[in-house]
Image (spheres, helix red, strand yellow):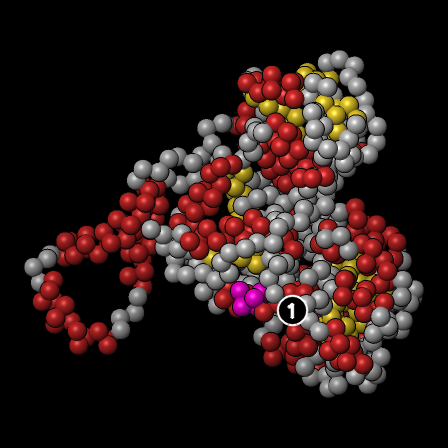
Amino acid sequence: MATFKDLGLEENLLQAITDMGFETPSEVQEKTIPILLDRETDIVSLAQTGTGKTAAFGFPMLQKIQIESRTTQGLILSPTRELCLQITKEIESYGKHKKGLNVVAVYGGASIQDQARQIKKGAQIIVATPGRMKDMIGRGMIDISKIEYCVLDEADEMLNMGFYEDITEILSHSPKDKSTWLFSATMPKDVAKIAKKFMHSPVEITVGSKNVGTESVSHEYYLVNARDRYLALKRLADANPDIFSVVFCRTKRDTQKVAERLIEDGYNAAAIHGDLSQNQRDLVMKSFRTRQIQMLVATDVAARGIDVDNITHVINYQLPDEIETYTHRSGRTGRAGKSGVSIVIVSKSELRKIKSIEKIIQRNFTKKEVPSGMEICETQLFHLANSIKNTEVNHEIDAYLPNINEVLENFSKEELIKKVFSVEFTRFYNYYKNEKDLNSTVAGDTSIGNSEDSVRYFINIGGRDDFNWMSLKDLLKDLLSLGQDDVFRVDVKDSFSFFNTDKKHQELVLNIFNDFKLDGRNISVEISKDGRKKGGGRSGGKGRSKGKRGGKSFDGGGSGFKGKSRRRSSERPTGKGTGGKRRRRN
């Protein structure tokens, strides 16, 4: 096994490595560092979150820059301010024995003037988020015309967050002969597009397989009715008393709502999302790292930069808009050689996405049953027994023992055990004794619409009209006033799509779309057979509309249906803050 010295690192960096307690390089470090030290080259390095990518590019950059120069020589772009600050801190730690090193973090939510002053003093390395970096370049506050190394960290996430144009603009101000180092967990088309446009014959390094999930993480899904999603989340938390988890939601509003409900029900929970101030986010993360918070409810964007060890579970309360994002989520657990569990709470209309994720991560999901109330009671009792067994005796209690013994002297050992454990058992028993079975009654493949009791429809709008499966499903649910699970198997093609409902909704669907218009365009819905429309159907033109709801027309824009794979913005949440309280419910 190679050592850091074998990789060719200089003595002051090796001393920093010793100070931090690193012993052997990770696979991505072992494969990447020698190449970057040996030659000037572009590189694409694909590795999962938590595999040590920051050190893989940080050490080579520190060894290659000229510390005595005040010119900015290295630029590191990252998707979020949390990750930006984390990288800055790590680079400073790596270069602690390089006197004169100045690493400046550039990100939104902090004083732009203060950041400009720090750079003016001479910053050999700038770590930045794309939005703030583009702003400061535009104001003439940063000069990157002489940089020699540019790192695109978490490139897939930056592009997923819509930073393609910002990155293009930033790189246009940099030298063409610089070395570009791209690091990513997955390799979607947009990342390949960046590599082709801005890199010259890059060396490609892959740790594992592209987009594949780590072997230390097991993947489970729980099939429930959509309305029971929150109840299932609580049961999974109760069934894992030592849970230390990140719970993912799609929107800021859902994140805040779920966190508030958990707090009200007595769990140690908090929310982290884009509407929090930097100070609030710092407080939440401090509480999470010290385990005062057991369940951190987060959006995908806010979760970038969460670098916390020993996370036991990642819970997908809602699946992400982009399937590839699941790889990032599950990478939060199972790190540093430890095992972890990635859980998906899924409704029958979403079950088809499990198969898509399995293909990407090349791992199989295990279908699990949401535990019953009595199973949870049993788990909690044994957890209490083990806690008592492992508790160290505090001998300060000795002075009180005579009086305690006097109070309890008439009880046998068995009676005392029953009384002690009844305190915990009764709480859970009273809560769960009348609770229903949350597992969906729809079994196997029938849960994704293959049942004889469902109808498949053809509709003449699709991807060309700026729809994806989720935005079209939302539109249909709104028009038909149906529930989350009542519209399923939504397949969006280029100029048309398919969807299913139960047979009982057939008349409703056909009536709603009888002479229906979207911004003056006729929308045709017909019963399909074997994935094909029955009749000739009417075709529509390109482009989405902004019509008005009146008679049978609909304003698609009014409900936030933006289609394609853009993230929906959510309302600014209101209500309680982000802190938690002592874990337990009524």
Classify residue 438 as left or right of residue 406: right
Question: On screen, 322 above or below 117?
Answer: above
x then y, percent, for residue 556: 71, 35
Question: On screen, 398 above or below 181?
Answer: below
Question: On screen, 160 above or below 106?
Answer: above
Q: In the current view of this chain or complex, which residue is farthest to the right? A: 176
Classify residue 433 as left or right of residue 73: left
Q: Which quadrant does the N terminus fall into?
A: bottom right
| Magenta span of residues | 280-284
Q: Residues within 10 Å of mark 1 (few under 14, many from 20)?
A: some
Q: Is residue 50 visible?
A: no
x then y, percent, for residue 68: 82, 85
The residue tagged 1 is 86
The mark total stands at 1
Q: Is residue 162 visible?
A: yes
x then y, percent, for residue 70: 83, 82
x then y, percent, for residue 67: 79, 82
- Which residue occupies 15% across, 53% down? 414
* Quadrant in the picture for residue 389: bottom left
- Which residue occupies 72% across, 39% down? 557
- Which residue occupies 62% across, 59% down? 275
Residue 493 falls inside the magenta stretch: no
Question: On screen, 155 above or below 250?
Answer: below
Classify residue 356 as left or right of residue 126: left
Residue 283 falls inside the magenta stretch: yes
* Quadrant in the picture for residue 524: top right
Pick whichever, 221 or 478, lies toward us. 478
Magenta highlight: main SS: helix
Q: In the current view of this chain or complex, which residue is farthest to the left? A: 410
Amino acid at dot 1: Gln
- Which residue occupies 12% across, 72% down? 402
Pick whichever, 519 or 107, lies toward us. 519
